Image: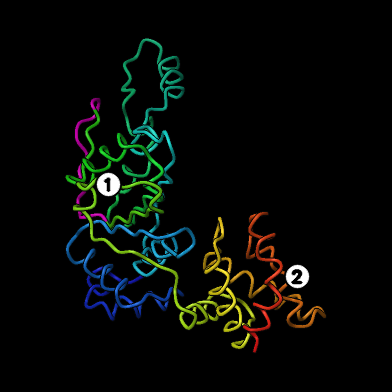
Amino acid sequence: MNGTSAETVAISPEAVAQHLAASRYLADDSLATAIFLAIRLGKPLLLEGAPGVGKTEAAKAIAALLGRDLVRLQCYEGVDAAHALYEWNYQRQLLAIRHAGEHEIDIYEDRFLIARPLLQVLKAPEQRVLLVDEIDRSDHEFEALLLEFLSDFQISIPERGTIRATAQPIVILTSNRTRELAEALRRRCVYHWIGYPDAEREAAIIMLRAGDVAEVTARAVAAAVQTIRARPLAKPPGIAEAVEWANAATILEKGGSPWPEAFRRAIGVLIKDEEDLSYIAPELGRIVEEALA
C-alpha cells in the first residue's frame, strides 16, 4: 500500500485533516488534533460516540493515509485471549506428529501458530494499524487484558517466550458507550468524542462520499436528517445512512420519481426500525418539503 509516513502526517493537526480529506474523510479540528496527538505521543486513540457517527471510518481513513493495513478486532460479549492474541492450530500439530513418526518435531514453530489481531500488529507494527472496535461490548476481564497489552505492547507465549513490538503500534479503540470503560483504560488513551455533524458538514460529507448526488440534494438530505435525528427514535440514522439516502433518492429521481416522492420512497435506507418508521411516517412529507424549500 502507498501512503504517508506517520512523521509526515503528524506535522500538525491541519496536516492530519488535509491527509484525511484526501482519503475522503472530513475531520473537524478537534478530531484532527486528537489523531495528531495520539500519533506524536505514541498513545492509543479512544473514539466514543453514537453508532454511525464515523468512528470506524476514522480508523480506516487513518490506516489508508498511512498506507498501512487495518487489523480489526471486533469486540463482543465473551471475546477472549484466543480470539484477540493467538492460539495453536492443534489439528495441524497432531497431523505433523503423526507424519513425523519417530523423528523429533517442534510443534511450536510459526507454522502452527495462529496470530490473532493483537499479535498480528505486534509482529509488524510499522505495516499495520490496530482497530479495537466497540470495546464497550466486551467484558471487564477482556478490558483488563487489553490494558496490559497497551501498557507494554508485548505478548508472552509460554512455549515461545515474549514477543515485543519493534516500534510503537498505532492503536484505535472505539466505543458506543453502552457501558462505562475502566478509568485505567481511559487514562492510557488520547480521548475524543465524535458527535453527529451539523447540517453544513454533513452535506459536505454526503457530497464527498456519495455518488452522483447534486449539491442541492445533499443539502436537503442533511437538513432532513438533522430534523429526523431530533425525534426520539430507537435507532437514529448515522452518517452512512444519510449518504445512502441521498444516493437512493437520486437513483429514484433519475428513474422518474419526482421530488419529494423520491425521498419518501427511499426512506427504508435511512430508517431501519419498524417502530421508528411508524413514528416518523406522518411527519416525513413535511420534513422533506421543508428540507427542499
Q: Nearer the viewer, mark 1 or mark 2?
A: 2
Quadrant assignment for the C terminus: bottom right
| Up-down relation of residue 230 to residue 115 (above or below) | below
Where does the magenta region start and end?
A: 158-169
Q: Main secondary structure of the magenta part?
A: loop
Residue at position x 29%, y 51% in the image: 124
Quadrant assignment for the N terminus: bottom left
Residue at position x 58%, y 66% in the image: 241
Q: Position of residue 269 (x, y in %)?
A: 66, 64
Give the CA distance from mark 1 to mark 2: 48 Å
Q: Position of residue 117 (x, y in %)?
A: 37, 44
- Work out which residue is located at the far right of the displayed protein and give it: 256
Q: Which mark is residue 71?
A: none
The colouring scheme, among rainbow, by chain, secondary structure or one colour, is rainbow
Q: Position of residue 111 (x, y in %)?
A: 38, 33
Callout 1 secondary element:
helix
Task: Give the number of callouts.
Answer: 2
Q: Is residue 223 magenta?
A: no
Q: In terms of image quadrants, where is residue 63?
A: bottom left
Q: In terms of image quadrants, where is residue 36?
A: bottom left
Q: Which residue is mark 2?
A: 265
Q: Is residue 159 magenta?
A: yes
Q: Which residue is mark 1?
A: 122
In this view, the residue in front, 91 or 38, is: 38
Is 215 situated left or right of 136 in this image? right
Residue at position x 41%, y 61% in the image: 55
Residue at position x 52%, y 69% in the image: 230
- Badge 1 density bin: few <14, some 14–19, many ≥20, Cα 10 Å: many
Instruction: Give amino acid for label 1.
Output: Leu
| Up-down relation of residue 60 to residue 290 (above or below) | above
